[in-house]
Image: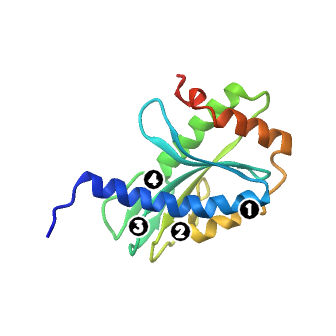
């Protein structure tokens, strides 16, 4: 049997991001814009940024095919394993994105964090889990009908800023 490497984890993560990205791309028919793999100055990236009439969302994707996932306010447990800080990381990404976008947009830009679990068997959520939206990959379509947060001109303005790499890499 072949030994697992860090590349296996990277490719698994990429496969999950592609699946979630495909679901997010479907929302473009409803006036949404999607950016994938936004680089961060401290390393790493924001998996996806969704911009549309319902607001701006950072989307953190986890490929957990066949796993049981429990989600609390600050931690996630996968198959009853050790806690992982996925919700906290998602909130930090949203806060960072808000700072970047508000630095370059002439209006406030609220950014909400989203966690998408690809292929999870179970996804029970704690009743207190209110700060991060949590979905399976097929459930991200629930964001499509959201409206009332950004005008079409604001969507265009936020998207224009967000698609420029330099905005994200300037400290």
Nearer to us: label 4 or label 1:
1
Residue 127 rendering spot, x and y as whole percentages: 58, 67
Give the distance between the C-alpha atoms of the residues marked 4 and 3, in whole angstroms.
13 Å
Nearer the N terminus, badge 3 or badge 2? Answer: 3
Nearer the N terminus, badge 2 or badge 1? Answer: 2
Q: What residue did someone put label 4 on?
A: 86
Q: Quadrant of residue 84?
A: bottom left
Locate the N terminus and report the quarter of the image it occupies. Answer: bottom left
Q: What residue did someone put label 1 on?
A: 144
Disc 1 crowd, CA 10 A, few/some/many (<14, 14-19, 20+): some
Disc 4 crowd, CA 10 A, few/some/many (<14, 14-19, 20+): many
Nearer to us: label 3 or label 2:
3
Q: What residue did someone put label 2 on?
A: 125
Nearer to us: label 4 or label 2:
4
Numbered disc 3: secondary structure: loop
Disc 3 crowd, CA 10 A, few/some/many (<14, 14-19, 20+): some
Q: Residue at x 44, y 68 (%)?
A: 70
Nearer the N terminus, badge 4 or badge 3? Answer: 3
Is the Cβ of the residue at disc 4 closer than 8 Å to that at disc 2?
no
């Amino acid at each position: 049997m072949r030994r697992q490497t860090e590349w296996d984890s990277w490719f698994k993560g990429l496969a999950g991001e592609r699946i979630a990205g495909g679901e997010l791309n479907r929302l473009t028919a409803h006036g949404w814009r999607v950016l994938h793999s936004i680089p961060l100055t401290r390393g790493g990236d924001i998996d996806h940024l969704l911009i549309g009439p319902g607001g701006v969302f950072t989307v953190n994707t986890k490929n957990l095919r066949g796993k049981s996932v429990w989600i609390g306010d600050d931690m996630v447990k996968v198959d009853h394993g050790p806690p992982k800080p996925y919700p906290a990381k998602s909130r930090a990404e949203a806060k960072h994105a808000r700072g970047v976008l508000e630095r370059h947009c002439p209006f406030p830009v609220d950014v909400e964090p989203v966690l998408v679990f690809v292929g999870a068997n179970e996804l029970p959520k704690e009743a207190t889990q209110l700060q991060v939206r949590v979905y399976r990959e097929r459930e991200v379509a629930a964001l499509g009908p959201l409206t009332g947060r950004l005008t079409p001109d604001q969507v265009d303005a936020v998207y224009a800023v967000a698609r420029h790499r330099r905005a994200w890499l300037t400290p």
